[in-house]
Image: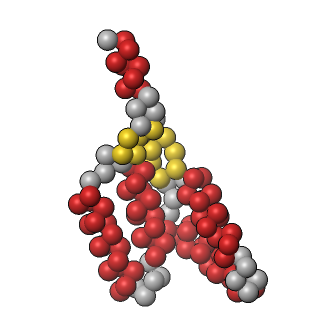
Amino acid sequence: MEQCEANKKHLSYFDGKLSQYLGYRILEFFVVLFTLGICYPWACCAIYRWKAKHTVIDGRRLYFDGSAVQLFGLWIKWFLLCIVTLGIYSFWTYISLKKWKCKHTHFRD
């Protein structure tokens, strides 16, 4: 009995459903399309939040607290840096986005 409880604490899994994922992706597609890409940071945050909400690592559920406004500010900064560096900074934007995403992903409990 005690061993079963210990194993549950160390379980890692993802419990999201395909139908939910497709629903989010379709909604995001139309929102981004109708706003001409301005709401793309909102779409990113929505999918990050959904993925974190359905992820359990070592028995602890994740949550994401980043906001679209924060990400929009970073997108503008990254865009301007790409222009100034003639596109060279674009190689760092992926890493910067990953760092921001990790900074805003936490364990629920």
Q: Residue furthest right?
A: 85
At x 38%, y 49%, the residue is: 53
Q: Residue furthest left?
A: 19
Asked if residue 69 lies left or right of residue 82, the reply is: left
Asked if residue 96 lies left or right of residue 38, the reply is: right
- Nearer to us in this view, 107 or 29: 29
Asked if residue 82 lies left or right of residue 12, the reply is: right
Query: What count of labels does the image hold?
Result: 0
Position of 77 relative to 55 (above/below): below
Position of 46 relative to 72 (above/below): above
Residue 92, given in percent of the width and then of the height, sits at: 68, 69
At x 36%, y 19%, the residue is: 5
At x 52%, y 45%, the residue is: 106
Can the viewer see residue 108?
A: no
Position of 33 relative to 89 (above/below): below
- Nearer to us in this view, 47 or 17: 17
At x 65%, y 64%, the residue is: 96
- In the rendered image, the quadrant that contains the N terminus is top left
Instruction: Indicate how the structure is coloured in the image.
Output: secondary structure
Residue 88, given in percent of the width and then of the height, sits at: 73, 79
